[in-house]
Image (cartoon, rainbow, N blue to C red):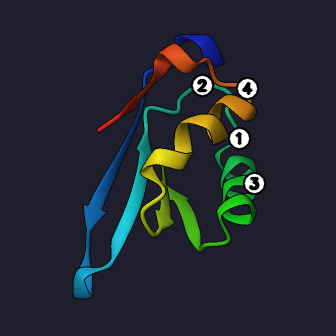
Amino acid sequence: AREQQKITVKIEKRKFGKKYTVITGLKGEVNLVDIVKKLKSKFACGGTAKKGQIELQGDHKFRMKPALVELGFPEETIEIR
């Protein structure tokens, strides 16, 4: 299931100029809550999983690809915007 996903990582600016890292494209039998828990502890930030996407507080765009590869997602399917 992890090989067929097109994962997109992007940054959104929210209230008060805060930046959020948003990961979309995770579908199938992927446990979002488990992935969020691992990413939050790795990057020492807050975050949530809602509406099929992961939101992490802060700008973690360039550290996200190695972290997702470490969790078992193939590098070719991860797109950084």
Is residue 81 visible to us here? yes
* Element at label 2: loop
The residue beneath circle 4 is: 72
Q: Tell whether 34 sits left or right of 60.
A: right
The amino acid pointed to by label 1 is Asn
Q: Is residue 60 above or below residue 4?
A: below
Q: Quadrant of residue 72?
A: top right
Q: Tell me, for residue 31, which label it has, or none.
A: 1
The residue beneath circle 2 is: 28
Chain-order first, disc 3 or disc 4: 3
- Name the residue: 65% across, 63% down: 43
Q: Residues within 10 Å of mark 2 (few under 14, many from 20)?
A: few
Residue occupying the far front of the picture = 62
The amino acid pointed to by label 2 is Gly
Position of the N terminus, as image quadrant, is top right
Q: Tell whether 80 sits left or right of 29.
A: left
Q: Tell me, for residue 38, which label it has, or none.
A: 3
- Name the residue: 62% across, 36% down: 66
Calculate the distance from the C-alpha at mark 3 to the C-alpha at mark 4.
12 Å
